Structures are given as structure tokens and as C-alpha cells.
Image (cartoon, rainbow, N blue to C red):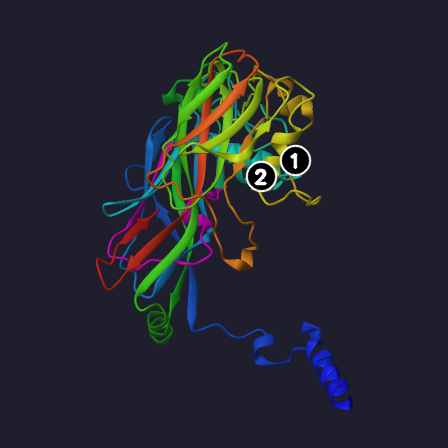
Amino acid sequence: MIFIYFYLLLIYKMAEVASNLLNYTPEGTRRRAVSSRGYRTLTPSSNGSEFIAGNTINLDLPGNVSNSFFDFGSSYLKLRIKNDGTGAAMALEGGSGIYSMIKKIEIVSGSSVLSTIDEYGALVNKFLTSDAAQQFKINTGAILAGTNSLPVAGTSIANNAFQTFCIPLVLTPLFNSAKYIPAFSRDQIRMRITLNTAAAGVISGAAPTNAQIKVDNVEFNCYMVELSNDAMSMVNEMTGGQYNIVVNDFRHAAYTVAAGATTLNSVVGFSFSSLNRVIVLHRPQATINAEAAASIGNRATATLTQLSVLVNGEQYPQRPIKDLGEDVKGGAEPLAEALIADRSLGYFGHDSSTGTAVAFCIANPAGTANATVGNYFLSVDMESMRADDADKLYAGVDTLGAVVSVNALYTNVPAAMRVDCYAEYTMSLMLDMNGTGTFSVAL
């Protein structure tokens, strides 16, 4: 009996733990990093010094830089935009600022396309609605990107004036990476940034032409980490010369739903080993290229009553997301499901700028005034297991070789709508220095 008592007491004592504030072991204290140095690099555009709306800007990041890594988490794109003689002031969209001027970002290395995000500005606008507070938009966001809490009142640029912006290329896989990106591949990394047209990218009553919206002083600012030879040898020994970076990326597909329609069934072509979520935006066709309206961030409900994603006929979620199909009173269930996909439901400190239901739920927003810009969006969570960041898990649906479609029901679509569908998926970015020495992608 005494033996059992002491045995139970021992188990109890073994279960006790001390606060980490009492952990004085080497593992519990800060440790010095390996021998290295950090420095800042400036990479100018490689295909010209001045661009106009609609042009493509190339930024070529060097390869073959020994012992060095890109720290894309400490990087940003710097550019200057000029209102070159439109005769009137022009404004950026408050919801996304200068991001609205970016239509597409492509990242390539050698013959491999690492990432392509079309309608990039519209995607950033959605995330600045769902994940950024109004206070950010009128403070830091206003300085860096030209945002504002009012959707049609971003930074205003007077006739013949200019403004400089510095923006991180958020949502791209290189920026999303939790690891440094090797700079010693045998080929450069090229970022191709395609600008929106003047009609889509800015708001102006003067109907500016593409040639009147000029962009110059373009450079990519990035911090580098250079390891000593000994430190680099240690890293190579740990990796075996193979650098595998698992990261999230986005892919876009677009469709049109006609005025008066009551259903949508669009095959989106999302083929990935881990499809994590699908984001769906409705934008009125009439405002997408309207100079006097918010073209990028003006999103409608389109009187939607139901939405789901089908993978080979299997429905996600198993019970479709439903809404009321009307103004003002709707939006609760779509927003709750979007917060689930964002892993922020129940977190009352989560920042957003969705506004009231009046702004979130407009069937066919005109987009020409602050009160007539809609914020509506939908997200479908495709992951089978909700994981903590420390788990390092991804649990999206395998859609390789599958037929993936977005299905929706409407009361009655009030006007023709552009339906932007974005897939968030997990991919593997691999650099094998024992092989080709260039980056490759596994989806």
C-alpha cells in the first residue's frame, strides 16, 4: 500500500512543470545566431525606367549569389505614380490604394513559372477589407499605399503632381514564406508586374488615358542574409543541398453571370494537391472599367442565396453557405464562414473594415460614392483539419485531376456580374543544388 502511495506521488510530481521564466538552460535562453551579415539591396526595373498604365514591369533578382538568402518578409516594392496632365485630380481607391494599379503578378525562374496571381489588386482589396482595420487604412496604410477608410477617397494626386509608395507584395508565395529564399540558384528570379489600365486603377472624372498615368522610380527593396562559409556548410549538411519551401499561393479564375440569372455553375480548373480555401467575389461589370467608380473593390451580393464548391460532384461545405438574397439584412452566414476559413471566428480582437451591413450587403453597388461601394465577399473553407501554426500541417482537398466548380443560386441577378474566384493552395518550392540548381514547383 505504501509503495502504491509513493508511486502515485511520483507520477503527480512528474506532471508538475515550472514556468518558462525559471528555465535557465541554454534551450530556454536567447542564443547567438550563426556568423552572418545582413544588408539591403535595391533592384531597379530591368525593362525601362518609365511606364504607363497597362504596361508590364520586370524586376530581375540576381542568382548565383554565394551563401546568400532573400528575406522577402523584409522587402517592398517602391514606385512613383504621376498624374501627367489629365487636367484634374485623380484618386486611388481607398480600399486598396496603389495595389489597385496592379492587375497581375507573375514570378518566374528559368523555364519554371513559380506563381501567377491575376486580378491581384482585387484580391488584396478583399484582404484589406477582411483583415485590416480602418485605423490602419488612415494611418500606416495611407502613407505606404495610399489607402483610406473611405472607399473612393484614397490618396488624391493633383494634375501634374506625383506620389511615391512603398508596398510589400503581400499574398505572393515569396512574401508568404516563413523561410529565407536561397539567392544562389543558377538562374535569376523575375517578377513581372502588370499594371491596370487608367480606367480600372484610379478614380477620376477626367477620363485619363493610359499614357497620362505614369509610373517611374521603380525598385525592389530587399534585405539579404549572407552566411559565413562555416555556417553555409552547416546548412548544406542539414539540407543535403535540397531546399524545400512549403508555402501558400493563390490562383485566379473569372466568369460572368448575366443579369436576370438565378444560377451559376462554373468549372474553375483548380488542380492542386491541397486546395485550402476558395474565395468568391462579385463585381458589377458596369464599374470594372469605369473611370468615375471604384473598379477594383466594388463588390456586390448579386442577390446571392446559396454558394458551394463541388469537387467531382462532392459538395463543400456539405451544407451550402446560405444568405438572404437581399440588401441590409443579410451577410451574417457568409461572413461567419469567411472568418472560419480565415481562422478568426470568435477572436474579438480580429481587425476588419467590412463596415455595417449597409456597406457589406449591396445587391448592385454603383461604386461612385463612398455610400455606394459594396464590400461583400465569400470564402469556402476546404481544409479537413483546423491546425495551429506550430503544427506545420496543411489539410486541403486534393483536386489533382478532379473537376472543381463553383455553384451558386441567386434570387435574381440585378445586372451582369464579373465573378472572381481565387484558390488558396499549398505548394512546394524546391531548389535542388545537386541537380539543375534552379527552382521548381510541385502543386
Q: Amino acid at mark 2?
A: Gly
**Is residue 266 left or right of 432 when viewed as pictured?**
right
How crowded pointer 2 is (Cα within 10 Å; few <14, some 14-19, many 20+) is rated as many
- Relative to the observer, which residue lies in front, 217 or 391? 391
Residue at the image position 40 percent from the left and 22 percent from the top: 212
Residue occupying image coordinates x 51% and y 46%: 384
Q: From which residue to which does the magenta span run?
A: 167-194
Expressed as whole percent of the image width and height from the top left, the position of residue 443 reads 35, 46
Q: Nearer the viewer, residue 181 or 156?
A: 181
Give the residue at mark 1.
Answer: 134
Look at the numbered disc 2 and give the secondary structure of its residue: helix
Disc 1 residue crowd, few under 14, some 14–19, many 20+, Cα 10 Å? many
Answer whether residue 169 is magenta in the image: yes
Image x and y of residue 49, in percent = 32, 37
Classify residue 220 as left or right of residue 137. left
Choose top left, top right, bottom left or bottom right for residue 67: bottom left
Q: Earlier in the sequence, mark 2 or mark 1?
A: 1
Residue 96 visible in the shown view: no
